[in-house]
């Protein structure tokens, strides 16, 4: 199987459940997006900024941070210096164990200047967004229920739009950063879409899964099983102890978008098999 064929196999596996219409979005993307995203991660050197954290009430959901941590670990293994970029309370929850850059919540007027300062400071070689709310055309942020969550959002959009380096954005619903790439197709979904674009858009039924899919692609390219040591349930415990909630139920459970960890674990095993390691 060529790397492009492997990427397409991963792309199909990532949207097989299709609870929010990601198969519709897949048809608008050029095949090979997992491969192209993996290549960008593999080429990254020095600082890599990973934006994550979707606000739910006064906390954050499990989908996004878990995948960001997986990408952080993979990038660190490859020799890059990943930095998680998020607002409170997620930034405060993670700062003891990871490199974190905290951005301001609920102040859109200063978001662009804040991003410029951070980009100048870090000079990143790559920007990644995973399950970050994307700004709609009206300048506000919306969740899957159509609720305006702007007061609880920190704007990561400007990190992508002002950066001179490549960007990868991951989403699973249409309201995340990056979905502006396929705005006409996203308009078919029952959602207030994000208008923010990226260089390489990666989709999945659950954004965390996309992180694992990219890592599986990296594994195949390097001949090294980078998913072998991942303990999904342990990572959910880690986030739960720090106040996470499921994005669907809004409850503090060991789930991702309403799905038990065992489903993610089975998917990761499938990815390891597809990429030739099991």
Image (cartoon, rainbow, N blue to C red):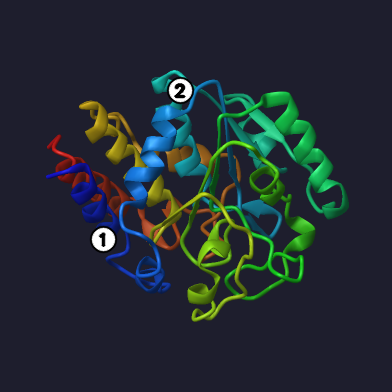
Kindly report the distance in space between the C-alpha atoms of the residues bearing marks 1 and 2: 28 Å
Where residue 42 sits: x, y (%)? Answer: 39, 30
Specify whether residue 70 is in view.
no
Circle 1 Cα neighbour tier, 10 Å, few/some/many (<14 / 14–19 / ≥20)? some
Q: Residue at x 45, y 43 (%)?
A: 67
Q: In the image, which disc is placed on residue 76?
A: 2
The answer to whether 34 is drawn above or below residue 126 in the figure is: below
Secondary structure under tag 1 reads helix
**Residue 93 image position (x, y, % from top left):** 64, 36
Front-most of residues 252 and 90: 90
Q: Residues within 10 Å of mark 2 (few under 14, many from 20)?
A: some
Report helix, strand or loop for mark 2: helix
Q: Quadrant of the N terminus?
A: top left
Residue sitting at the far right? 109
Q: Which residue is at the front of the view, 216 or 243? A: 216
| Residue 103 versus residue 152 in the image, above or below | above
- Residue 67's label in the rendered image is none
Q: In the image, 246: left or right of 137?
A: left
Mark earlier in primary sequence (1, 2) = 1
Image coordinates of residue 34 in percent, x first then y, are 34, 48
Point out which mark residue 12 bears. Answer: 1
Q: Are marks 1 and 2 in contact (CB under 8 Å)?
A: no
Q: Left or right: 118 with respect to 265?
A: right
Left or right of 226 on screen, residue 169:
right
In the displayed structure image, the side of residue 233 where residue 9 appears, left or right: left
Residue at 50% across, 79% down? 189
Residue 246 appears at what percent x and percent y?
51, 57
Report which quarter residue 214 is drawn in. top left
Count of picture labels:
2
Q: Is residue 261 visible?
A: yes
Against 136, residue 224 (above or below) is above
- Name the residue: 21% across, 54% down: 9
């Amino acid at each position: 199987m060529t790397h492009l064929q492997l990427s397409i196999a991963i792309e199909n596996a990532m949207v097989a459940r299709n609870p929010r219409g990601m198969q519709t979005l897949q048809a608008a993307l050029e095949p090979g997006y997992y491969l192209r995203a993996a290549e960008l991660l593999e080429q990254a050197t020095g600082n890599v900024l990973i934006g994550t954290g979707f606000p739910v009430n006064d906390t954050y959901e499990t989908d996004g941070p878990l995948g960001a941590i997986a990408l952080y670990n993979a990038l660190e293994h490859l020799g890059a210096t990943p930095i998680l970029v998020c607002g409170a309370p997620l930034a405060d929850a993670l700062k003891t164990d990871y490199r974190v850059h905290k951005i301001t919540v609920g102040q859109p007027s200063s978001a662009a200047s804040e991003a410029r300062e951070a980009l100048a400071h870090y000079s990143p070689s790559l920007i990644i967004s995973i399950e970050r709310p994307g700004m709609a055309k009206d300048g506000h942020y919306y969740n899957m229920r159509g609720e305006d969550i702007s007061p609880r959002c920190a704007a990561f959009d400007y990190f992508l739009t002002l950066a001179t380096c490549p960007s990868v954005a991951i989403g699973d619903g249409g309201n995340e950063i990056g979905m502006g790439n396929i705005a006409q197709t996203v308009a078919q979904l029952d959602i207030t879409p994000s208008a923010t674009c990226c260089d390489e858009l990666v989709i999945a039924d659950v954004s965390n899964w996309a992180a694992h899919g990219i890592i599986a692609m990296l594994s195949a390219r390097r001949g090294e099983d980078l998913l072998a040591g991942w303990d999904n349930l342990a990572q959910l415990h880690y986030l739960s102890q720090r106040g996470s909630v499921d994005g669907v139920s809004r409850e503090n459970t060991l789930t991702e978008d309403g799905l038990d960890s065992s489903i993610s674990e089975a998917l990761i095993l499938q990815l390891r098999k597809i990429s030739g390691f099991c």
